[in-house]
Structure formats: structure tokens, C-alpha cells
């Protein structure tokens, strides 16, 4: 009897561990990023971004779709940006106690951004690689290319999921 109880407990812990990374439902990370943007022939300019990224899980434990809404400071004037984001989980780290240690994910974005100096605004196409922990904190390295003017944007961002559901205790 004790053996069966032990196996059931292990099964519960395994399911609890698996449910923490890219769980079903909604997430709302807030991301703060720093980096640079570099127009062709110009020195790099400081880049600061603040984004809210509401996301919904399309394939549990694997794929998310979201919308990026935020602002940016590319070394001159403040602007706004918005667009879709697709996030694919590539791998998951080993469990530590009853939680996964990390996940590695790939993200792709297409962002429309305001730009007072440009007639058509900016269109940023890019993506990056992210490292997340327990669907709560993420660190991402992102690279975007401006399609309307020859400029490259690089940033490192840190995010915190303010809508993380509580994990039920055993």
C-alpha cells in the first residue's frame, strides 16, 4: 500500500512540475529592456523599452501567441510600439524539488512603431531567445531590423508575469 501511495505522490509532483512552464490560459508579463539601435553610418544610440505583453497559450507547454504594447526611447524622442509576438518553448531544464528550473524559448515579433521623423513610421521585424523560470521571470536577448530605414535594434530585457496563477499546494 505504501508503494502505491508513493507512486501516486510522485505522479502528482511530476504533473505539478510540468504545469508551471507555458501553462494553459493567460499570462501578462511586463518587460523592461535596454540596448542600442544603430542606423547605418551612425554611432549606436541608447535604447530603452517598456512593454506589456498579454499572451495566451495555444499549445499547452509549447506555444504562446501575444500582443506587444509599449513605449521606447531610441536616443532621441519617446515613441510607442505594438504588434504580435509568437513564443515557442524549445527546451525545459531539469526539475528542482517540485518545480522546473528554467525553460529556453524562441520568440518572433513584428512591431509597428511611431517615429516623428519618418513618414510611414517604423516597422520592426525580429526575434530572440529567452530564458524563463516558473512562468514568472524571463530574460530575453532580442534583435530587430527596421524595415523602413536601415537600422538595427538590439536589446536585453527582463520580464515579470503579473498574472501568474497560484500553484495549488499539496
Image: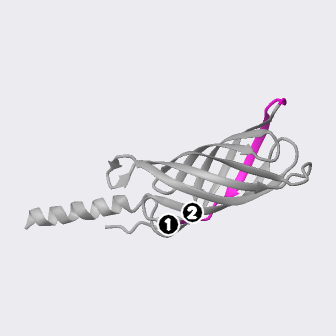
Estimate the x, y position of residue 92 in percent, counting from the top left. 40, 49
Estimate the x, y position of residue 29 in percent, counting from the top left. 60, 59
- Name the residue located 80 percent from the left edge and 57 percent from the top edge: 80
Most extreme residue toward the left is 1
Report the span colored magenta: 41-56
Find the distance from the CA under tag 2 to the CA under tag 1.
7 Å
Residue that carries the numbered disc 1 in the rendered image: 58
* SS assignment for the magenta stretch, majority: strand
Disc number placed over residue 65 in the picture, else none: 2
Estimate the x, y position of residue 143 in percent, counting from the top left. 66, 42
- Name the residue located 60 percent from the left edge and 51 percent from the top edge: 108
Location of the C terminus (image quadrant): bottom left
Vertically, is 108 above or below 44? below
Disc number placed over residue 113 in the picture, else none: none
Residues 126 and 37: in front is 126
In the image: residue 98, left or right of residue 108: left
Q: At numbered mark 2, what does the secondary structure look like: helix, strand or loop?
A: strand
Tag 2 near tag 1, CB within 8 Å: yes
Please check the rendered image and state whether residue 120 is part of the magenta-colored stretch, yes or no: no
- Name the residue located 24 percent from the left edge and 63 percent from the top edge: 11
Please check the rendered image and state whether residue 52 is part of the magenta-colored stretch, yes or no: yes
Amino acid at each position: 500500500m505504501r508503494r502505491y501511495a508513493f507512486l501516486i505522490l510522485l505522479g502528482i509532483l511530476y504533473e505539478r512540475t510540468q504545469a508551471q512552464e507555458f501553462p494553459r490560459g493567460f499570462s501578462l508579463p511586463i518587460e523592461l529592456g535596454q540596448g542600442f539601435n544603430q542606423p547605418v553610418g551612425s554611432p549606436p544610440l541608447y535604447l530603452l523599452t517598456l512593454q506589456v505583453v498579454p499572451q495566451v497559450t495555444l499549445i499547452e507547454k509549447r506555444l504562446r501567441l501575444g500582443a506587444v504594447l509599449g513605449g521606447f526611447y531610441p536616443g532621441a524622442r519617446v515613441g510607442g510600439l505594438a504588434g504580435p509576438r509568437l513564443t515557442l518553448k524549445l527546451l525545459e531544464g531539469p526539475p528542482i524539488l517540485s518545480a522546473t528550473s528554467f525553460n529556453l524559448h524562441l520568440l518572433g515579433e513584428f512591431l509597428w512603431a511611431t517615429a516623428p521623423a519618418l513618414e510611414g513610421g517604423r516597422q520592426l521585424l525580429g526575434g530572440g531567445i529567452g530564458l524563463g523560470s516558473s512562468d514568472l521571470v524571463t530574460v530575453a536577448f532580442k534583435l530587430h531590423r527596421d524595415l523602413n530605414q536601415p537600422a538595427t535594434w538590439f536589446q536585453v530585457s527582463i520580464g515579470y508575469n503579473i498574472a501568474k496563477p497560484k500553484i495549488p499546494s499539496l
